[in-house]
Every structure is written in C-alpha cells, then in structure tokens.
Amino acid sequence: MNLTLKIWRQKNADTKGKLVDYSLSDVSPDMSFLEMLDVLNEQLINKGEEPVAFDHDCREGICGMCSLYINGEAHGPDRGVTTCQLHMRMFKDGDTIYIEPFRAKAFPVIKDLIVDRSSFDRIQHAGGFISVNTSGNTIDANAIPVNKEDADDAFAAATCIGCGACVASCKNSSAMLFVGAKVSQFALLPQGKVEATDRVLNMVKQMDEEGFGNCTNTGACEVECPKGISLENIARMNQEYLKAALKG
Amino acid sequence: MALDSKIPNGPIADKWTNYKNHIDLVNPANKRNIDVIVVGTGLAGGSAAATLAELGYNVKAFCFQDSPRRAHSIAAQGGINAAKNYQGDGDSTYRLFYDTVKGGDYRSREANVYRLAEVSANIIDQCVAQGVPFAREYGGLLDNRSFGGVLVSRTFYAAGQTGQQLLLGAYSAMNRQIGRGKIKMYNRHEMLDVVIVDGKARGIITRNLITGEIERHSAHAVVLGTGGYGNVFFLSTNAMGSNVTAAWKAHKRGAYFANPCYTQIHPTCIPVSGDHQSKLTLMSESLRNDGRIWVPKKIEDVEAIRNKTLKPKDIPEADRDYYLERRYPAFGNLVPRDVASRAAKERCDAGYGVNATGEAVFLDFASAIQRYGKEQAHVKGLDENDAALVKKLGQEVVKNKYGNLFQMYEKIVDQDPYNTPMMIYPAVHYTMGGIWVDYNLMTTVPGLYCIGEANFSDHGANRLGASALMQGLADGYFVLPYTIGDYLSDDIRTGPISTDTKEFVAAENEVKERLNFFVTNDGQHSVDYFHKKLGKIMWNKVGMSRNVKGLTEAISEIKALREQFWKEVKVPGTNEEYNEELAKAGRVADFLELGELFAKDALNREESCGGHFREDAVELDGEQKGEAKRDDENFAYVAAWEYKGEPSDAVLHKEQLEFKDIELKQRSYK
C-alpha cells in the first residue's frame, strides 16, 4: 500500500519542531509500524537526508522504549499493543498517518520522536523498591504464603512497561496510572507492607515535583495502556495515600 | 599467557564455601574509597551494580537504553531455574548441576556450574523478598513448571514475563541505591573502549548518545554485563540495540574471547515474514509443556496447507508426524533446544515445512485444550462429553498460562492460535560463547570482570531453558560481590584513579578518530545494508548446520564485506548530536570482526557439540544414527582466542576441561 506520513521533525530540545510530509510506497501489511519507519529511513539515508529518530529496542512489546503518538493515539489505533507490535494491516492504502512524539511537560523532546522519560526513573528512585539487601540470607521463599488472588493482582500491576502512554493519553499529563501500578504491586504483597507509608508519600511527592498533572478520572490512560493496567491501581494508590497521610 | 581457571581445591560441593572462607575482604570503611564501573544493566549488570553499592562501593552504572529497566533481560519469557525441590520430585543441587553440564554437552566448567546450582535457591528467596510477584498456587506457595532437557519441575515463573519481573526486581534494588547516591546512573551512554593502566582495567570511554560527548570514567575495577552477540546474525530474538561492542573492545584490549561459535538457535520463534523483517520474536519454551510439535506425514498435505486448500486441524491424527515424540520418546517435545531446532530443520529440509517459505512447523495446543477442558469439567462437575464446553474451559486454562504469548502471536501473524496451531521456526536466541573468565569471573585482563551472557562460563555448548536468568542473577547478586572484593582488597590504598593519564587520552583519541571517520566517510551504503549482508552469510554458512566448505567461504566473504564496509559505509549527521546511525556503524564494525572469528572458531572445532553442529561429525549407525557426535579426546577444551589484529591472526589458547564429578558420555534424550 501507499501512504502519506506526516512526521514530527525537531533537531533537538532547543529548536522548534514541525510536521514534515513523506510519501512511502509498497508498504506490506505484514510489516510492523517500526519496520515501516525503517524502510523510510533507509530511503532517506540513500537520498542523503537525515533519518527520523525514534526510540525502540526489543521490538516485542516489553521494553517500553517505543513511544509514538500515531493519529492522535499513544501507540496508534490498535489496542493492547506497543508501537513495535502495531502492524500495518491496521491501516489502508492511501491513508495519511500523523506521527508525533509523546507530549507532556515532564517528557521533553530530545530529537524528532524521542522524548526524555527520566522523570519516571526519578519517581522510582524515591520509593519504587523494598529495602532488602541481597545477602542471600533472607527467609525461604515459601515461608510467607501469599493469597493467589493478591499475587495475581500484584503481578498484573507489575506488568507495566513504563512506556508513558498513560501520560501521553491524559489531557492533564497525569502519571497516576504508572505510579499507581508500582504502589499497588508492593501494597498487595506482604513484603511491601512494611514501608508502605513512606513509599506512597515519597513517590507521589516526586511525581508532583516532576510536573505531572492530576487525575480527573477520564480513564483514557487505561484504554491506551498497552498492558491493560487497570484504573483500580489509581484507586488503590489513593487509598494508600489517604491511609499514609492520616498516619502522618 | 597460559590460562589459569583458578578453580579452588577440594570436593566440588565444598569449593565455593571454602573459597569464601579464605578470600580477602575489604572492610566497610575502605569500600567507600573504592569505585567500580558496571556496564550494562540487565539481570547481571543490574544485580551486580545494586549489590556492590549495598556493600558500600561507589558504583557508576552505564546503559545505552533510556532507563536501566529496558535492558533486554526484560524480554525473557519462560522462567528461572532453582534447585528448591519444592515439588519433591527428586531435584537437588547436584541434579541441577548435572542437567546443566549434560545440557551443555559437556563443554562447560564443572566448578562454575556447581556454584551456579548451589546459589540458585538463594535467588528465589531474594527475589521474593524484593517483591517479585512469581506465579503461585491456590495454597499461596510458589508454582513451578517444566523446561526442556530435564526430568523435574524446577522452573519458577511469572506468566510469560519472568525476565521482566526479575529485571524490575534488580532495577528496584538499583533504584534504592541510586536514591541513596551509591550508584551514579548514566543512561543513554555507550561504552566505546576500556582503559588499561599499568596492566589493570581502570576505566572506560563512553559516548553520551544524546549530546555525542565523549567522556572518560575511571574506577578501580570494571565489570561488563553487556549481554550476548546474537545480532551478528542481523535477525535474532535480541533487541535491536543488543551488540558485542563492549565485549569486543575488551577483547581488543587483551581479554580472550571464548567459544564464539557456541550459539543457541531457539526452536520456537515466529517465522520470517519478508525482507522488511527487523527482528524475530520468540515464543517461550514453556509452550512446549503443552504444545505438540508436528508436520504432516504426507507431502500432498503439506502442499495443500501451503496453498491454503487444507486447514491443519482437518488433518487426521494418523497423518501427522509428531517427529520429536517419534524420535525422542523419553523427552518428547521437551528435548533441549539444540536438538529440537535441528529436528525442525531436518523436516523442513526434507520438504515438510508448512508455510509459503517452507520454513515452519506446527506447535499445536488442541490436545492440551482438550485435556485441561476435561479436567476442569470434571472438577466443576460439568458434562465432560460436551465438546464445546470442554474446549471453552480448556482454552481458559491455556489462556491463564500463556495468554500474553498467544496475544503476541496473534498480533504478529494475524491468526488465532487457540483455534489453529502456531507456526514456528528456529531463530538465533542466545550466545553461550563470550569473554573468557576464570572462577572469579575475571577476564584475562586484571580488574576487568565479565558476567551474565557476556561471559562464556556456565552453559557449555548449549544452554538449557530458564538458565540464563539464573546465571545472570547468580553472577550479579551472589558471585561477583565476593570475588571482586578479593581483588579490590589490594586497592584500599590506591586512592582515586585519575582520568588525565596518557592511557585515557590515547583511548579517547582512538574513539574520536573512529567516530570522525564514520561521519566524514563519503560512502554509498547504509549501515543496515552491511549488517543484513553479514547476517545472511552467518545464517547460511555459520548457522544451524556447518561444514568446512561453508565456513571457509564465510571467513573470506566476511573479510571482503568488512573491507567494503570501511570503504563504502555512509553515516548521515554529525557526532555532536543524537545519531543512531553513528552508534549502529560502530556496532556493525565490531560484528564484522567478531563474525569472522566466530566462523574461524567453528572451523577449528571439528566435532558436533550442543548448538555447534558439524555435518562431518555425526553418528553413522546404531540407535543414535544421525545425531551429533562429540569428540572428547580432541576437543574437550575451551577455545579462548587472543586478539592479534585481524581475526585471521587470532591465537588459540586451550583450557582443558576436566570432568571429575560427571561421567562424560553421549547425550541421549531417546
């Protein structure tokens, strides 16, 4: 199929960007979206032009590196996938496709479609862990049974890949789904309960300092999340936060 | 230099304990004066960085991704082995040790493998304490599954995302230390050289991938946890950025490279769909717990499937060839990876491949869905003869176990694997070869350590499933933190290492020269053009089955391609900006050297062992006819190559492998 691409080009963080038109022919429906961009880049390089910079790595939907905003949706029109798993069969011959970076104050553009998501890392530094040393002398793994439902819910929260689609999809650029998922994973497990109070307070404080917006319960984040992280995690974080705040 | 593996004396079960009792330690106050660089933040690098920082060392950690959490360990699916024997099915440290040595086709170092098995149980305790949400049974205890090449159930897992969960565990341990200021994290930095001062590794040169700035970093020791080199094949299950550069630079500075030809071709990957293909996707080995592998018995059925006039599920049982169950009745669909891959290739080469390219076999869940469905109907007191109900119940069970994998398959192939069998074909997945290390995980360069997939030590010629995660975490959490202390105890009075010495200047200049060459070279072909050509040579001539003619051709073809690359490669943009083509150019330049050494090593090893299959080394008769034939008399050694300029000049050093605790015999899975 033949496509018109309107791609955000921006030299670096300090310059202004703009949408640039490219036309691409002979696109196979079996290609992934990123493979389609590979083909475009190969053509640009051969013509002596600069290729489009975009983040990507594992190309199997788990590393969370790819971060494209396609036709107004994080990771494009398909559901439950990252950009690398989006296939061109989701588009039609003759389509015009808008490709932009994830946009949020806390995700400044580095170049073209690449953004800086180190704010997510800093939130994790503030409390995304259980304080246990790797001595190898911890108690036996089966010493504390964990209710299967809790373990499964903790796992479901922990499958967040930290891509930032939730932030990009939110009209307030809120990171509540991301932070809620991490807080929930630990809050649901007995090992995480010990530090629950400090964890939620510290992570939320850092989240606010990074310039993420507030949650107004629209739910776009849940819809666009490639891993189906549930809004329940935000509710659980709010509950944990309230408990912690009351404790002081 | 003669290779000294530094294996401690004494009985194998006591070696590690005795070793730990007699090494030198660094007291906590002195640790604060010692710096360690860790390159790579996957399971090995991430766990090492976190643990060293916990111990009190000042750690500088580097990764080329935008966050340590994105290292490719994240993509590991199936599970992690540990000799916990929670199932009471006869597992033990010895049995895990034995399975790993046998699975590696008797080409690994006994003492290292025993230590790995010994610390495996601790890994699970540690990960649970960190909040890793492993799969559990209804009683609240940890669940296990089976993997290939073993007869016990010792694999711990978190659905099909075990690597992700373990890496997030290591990442959280890192975060704690980053928050405390004990780890200084450098994201989006690529290591481009290691700096040797007075014979010791004392630092690295890096490029900031955003600004292009070249930086010098010093430390008292350098640890590489930089993963494998499967991307030398261009197409592999590795991430796009996975590369050999850090390991290759270490090799060029004196670290021997061991057994480069030992590569794991994983049997269950999604087949190639076209020339645009940029990578291959693994379907976890855990699927072979429940999936049965087959091709049609009749060639006319094969053709009808390719023409889409016949559906696979309409082929009657009697006309299906479950070739693994036929050839290997004892292990069936759970034979080790190398055996399963070769068996798929054998059927496809004979003309029984089931897709348009003739390079695919079926992985079928229909009988598992039936079996689970009946069991569920029975448990719930429902009608076991209601076919639709049984199918529905069975599909639910399968979805619980492998849901994310099935979804991934459906998105890529556009077929529903609950209702039609998956199509799979082998693909490059893991490299058992790597930088040679001694028992301390130190390379032939003092102060330079190598851990995880990047080293060669534990998997011999073939790695068993769920053992990569085990090794990465064992090295980083439980082995390196001891062994590196013994070395660093000599450095308590050294003080900070200066980066203003001639060695740092020289290394930095070399790095800059090479980068400048790329951005100014007036070439006509992109980096990918060369990478794809290299991949084709590797796959066709140094792939699943190797012979003297093909290997000899590959060596000269790679050399010619390398010469062409240096003349004709074209890199747009400049050095002083984000420039992915420039980063890729450096990586492919190193792959073009490694590829030749890889083929040379495969040519040297005139035997078949594990993932290395030589067509001139097969059993000619008897029960094992057609199976790989090892040559223990002449090749029971580690081939460690010393860099001497061109790959063709590399000098071979042999570490003879001794098997004192396990009898060397033919690996049979019949």
Image (cartoon, rainbow, N blue to C red):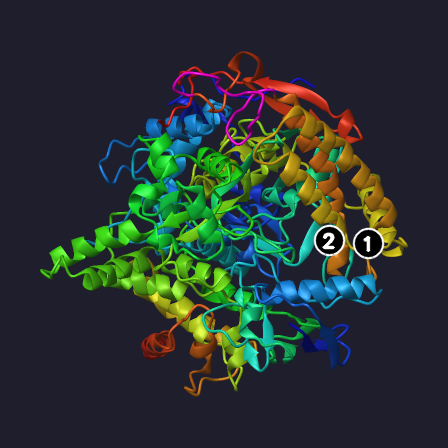
Q: Label 1: which residue? A: B525
Q: Chain for mark 1?
A: B
Q: Secondary structure at mark 2?
A: helix
Q: Residue at x 77, y 64 (%)?
A: A43
Q: Label 2: which residue? A: B528
Q: Chain for mark 2?
A: B
Coordinates of residue B290 in the picture (x, y in percent): 32, 47
Tag 1: amino acid? His
Circle 2 residues within 10 Å: few <14, some 14–19, many ≥20: some
Circle 1 residues within 10 Å: few <14, some 14–19, many ≥20: some
Residue at the farthest left position: B381
Coordinates of residue B139 in the picture (x, y in percent): 19, 53
Tag 2: amino acid? Asp
Residue B27: tell me if it is visible.
no
Coordinates of residue A165 in the picture (x, y in percent): 52, 74
Report the span colored magenta. Answer: B606-624
Task: Specify the quadrant of the image occupied by residue B504.
Answer: top right
Front residue (pair B568, A192): B568
Name the image quarter holding the C terminus of chain A: bottom left
Q: Would residue B620 be counted in the magenta stretch?
A: yes
User: In the rendered view, does B643 fall on the left or right side of B312?
Assistant: right
Q: Secondary structure at mark 1?
A: loop
Whole-number angstrom distance, CA of label 1 to CA of label 2: 8 Å
Q: Residue at x 30, y 33 (%)?
A: B151
